[in-house]
Image (cartoon, grey):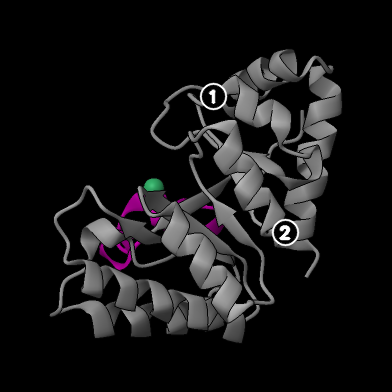
């Protein structure tokens, strides 16, 4: 199995060994970690880092989360800033969405971005998966998800992630291949192609 690890970071992580040693990175303004005091600084950091650090292959996590304490107007502003950078620097967008799928789908329809939008840690029902797929989104599945949602998603639109799960990505892919009733090698190839298309062929 060929593995390429993409790790996602915020400005607050920039001096950590995880950030420094990562091979490929995604950087964003996470809705959990933005304040009115640092939104401009974070936006500027992402712009500069995305321009100058060749490891950057995506913008995110960014998005909106109705269950966190951050003011929704501020979350939305941070999200818009990340979308603008994604479009300007031609980098795909990795989205954190909790109970905001309608808003995100509407936003994509109204902005009509050129860059791919990827929903990370998708755990929704098949109906929502289809809604996202019809609107051109990619879905990234983690350790736990609704198996029917995975089955209903076209394989050229799916990715896998470990996120908080401490195990190996191959465990997740093996389990998913089982759900899809295809071989692990086949799924591994599909996902590698998807990742190549999204992050490395641009
Ligand atoms: Zn997230």
Q: Quadrant of residue 109?
A: bottom right
Give left or right: position of 24 versus 192: left
Q: Is residue 94 depicted above or below 179 in this figure? A: below
Q: Which residue corresponds to mark 1?
A: 146
Q: Circle 1: is it few (<14), some (14-19), or many (20+) Cα within 10 Å? A: some
Q: Is residue 9 depicted above or below 172 in this figure? A: below
Q: Which quadrant is home to the C terminus?
A: bottom right
Circle 1 sits in a helix, a strand or a loop, which is it? loop
Q: Which quadrant is home to the N terminus?
A: top right
Residue at point 56%, 78% (across, down): 110
Q: Is mark 1 within 8 Å of ligand 1?
A: no
Residue at point 35%, 67% (across, down): 29
Q: Nearer the viewer, mark 1 or mark 2?
A: 1
Q: Earlier in the sequence, mark 1 or mark 2?
A: 1
Position of residue 66 measured from the top left corner of the image (x, y, whole percent):
26, 53
Q: Which residues are magenta?
A: 10-25
Front residue of this view, candidates 143 and 69: 69
Residue at point 25%, 63% (across, down): 12
Circle number at residue 75? none
Asked if residue 19 shows in the view, the reply is yes
Q: Is mark 2 within 8 Å of ligand 1?
A: no
Position of residue 76 measured from the top left corner of the image (x, y, whole percent):
32, 72
Circle 2 sits in a helix, a strand or a loop, which is it? helix
Circle number at residue 198? 2
Give left or right: position of 22 versus 150: left
């Amino acid at each position: 199995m060929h593995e390429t690890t993409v790790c996602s970071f915020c400005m607050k992580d920039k001096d950590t060994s995880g950030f420094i040693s990562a091979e490929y990175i995604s950087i964003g303004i996470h809705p959990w970690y933005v304040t009115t005091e640092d939104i401009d600084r974070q936006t500027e950091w992402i712009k500069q880092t995305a321009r100058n650090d060749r490891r950057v292959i995506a913008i995110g996590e960014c998005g909106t989360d109705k269950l966190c304490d951050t003011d929704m107007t501020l979350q939305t502003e941070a999200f818009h800033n990340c979308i603008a950078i994604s479009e300007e620097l031609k980098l795909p967008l990795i989205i954190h969405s909790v109970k905001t799928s309608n808003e995100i789908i509407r936003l994509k329809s109204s902005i009509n971005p050129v860059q791919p939008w990827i929903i990370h840690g998708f755990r929704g029902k098949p109906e929502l998966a289809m809604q996202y797929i019809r609107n051109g989104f990619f879905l990234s599945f983690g350790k736990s998800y609704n198996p029917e949602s995975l089955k209903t998603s076209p394989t050229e639109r799916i990715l896998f992630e470990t996120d908080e799960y401490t195990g190996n990505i191959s465990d997740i892919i093996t389990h998913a291949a089982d759900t899809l009733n295809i071989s692990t090698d086949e799924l591994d190839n599909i996902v590698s192609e998807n990742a190549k298309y999204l992050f490395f062929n641009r």
